[in-house]
Amino acid sequence: MTRDVKEIFGGALAAKVRTLAPSMTRSMQRVAEAVAGDPAGCAALTVTGLAERTGTSEATVVRTARVLGYPGYRDLRLALAGLAAHQQSGRAPVLTTDISVDDPIGDVVSKLAHEERQTLADTAAGLDTVQLGAAVSAAASARRIDVYGVGASGLVAQDLVQKFLRIGIVAHAHSDPHLAVTNAVQLRGGDVAVAITHSGSTGDVIEPLRVAFERGATTVAITGRADGAVTQYADHVLTTSSARESELRPAAMASRTGQLLVVDCLFVGVAQRNYEAAAPALAASYEALAHRHR
């Protein structure tokens, strides 16, 4: 394998660490920087060994692994070992599932389609329909709905808001953390706040949800981590599949498929409850858009 390919994959891990660093404590950053800088060396360490190497604790190492998108340190260690093995071998590295750098584009399409289908099936199988029904009930009668998400989750937040607006529901998507908190302060009982975060630990999403929760709004968390920090401020938790990730398709990207399924379920449920108002509102929006493009 060429040096360029090695740099691509090592750089992708480093980029992920840089992206997530603002949501980490300084001790967690030391752990993340260590694994990005020396995947092979860290893969050989136990959780205790990595804690000693970075001057942190075992609990910090485990928390860092979870923020990076792995259920625990064992999973992170296996991923690091795999990355190191690819770097040391002459084989083309795996991009996602079993897709390699030298796969024909037709194979890439087939393999990604299979992975997307599996993510949807896993999310559907794990979705708590009781929690979903409660979230639908709250949203269907809400005075207004605020949705929080950053990065890839921010795109999902915009998708949900666009759907709600099409059926006449007042909704706003907030990716700017300051505006999110400013708007959350205005919420009260009868309003709904939705936080979307795959890791469950994104501070810029958790903070406005906390404010909304304390103001009496009904709060919903859409997350890949049922035990994530965001859930402590959520009245209803809707979980997505923890999609398998790779260096070029990290959790922030792979998780979006499951998140989109959940927001579609939430939207359709609300449209069913409000059908008499939703149907004409949707028809009016179609007519307005069609008229604009004539």
Image (tube, grey):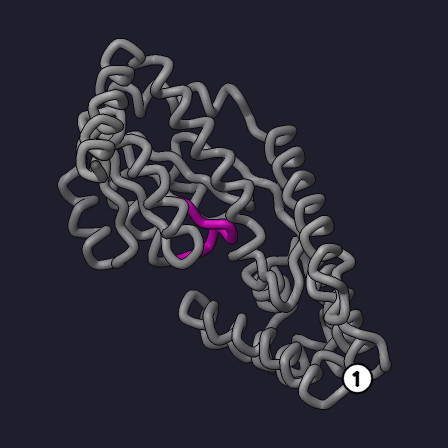
Residue at 76% x, 70% y: name it. Answer: 102
Determine the image quadrant of residue 151: bottom left
Q: Residues within 10 Å of mark 1 (few under 14, many from 20)?
A: few
Residue at 59% x, 58% y: name it. Answer: 69
Nearer-the-camera pick, 5 or 286: 286
Residue at 29% x, 55% y: name it. Answer: 175
Image height check: is 106 above or below 120? below
Q: Is residue 290 left or right of residue 156?
A: left
Tag 1 residue: 1
The residue stretch that appears in magenta: 196-202
Residue at 65% x, 85% y: name it. Answer: 7
Q: Does residue 216 show up?
A: no
Determine the image quadrant of residue 123: top right
Q: Which residue is farthest left?
A: 186
Q: Secondary structure at mark 1?
A: loop
Where residue 65 appears, x then y in whole percent?
A: 62, 63
Q: Provide the major secondary structure of the magenta segment.
A: loop
Q: Give amino acid for label 1.
A: Met
Where residue 80 appears, x then y in whole percent?
A: 73, 71
Where residue 81 appears, x then y in whole percent?
A: 79, 72
Q: Which residue is farthest front?
A: 294
Nearer-the-camera pick, 167 or 137: 167
Where residue 50 appears, x then y in whole percent?
A: 69, 76
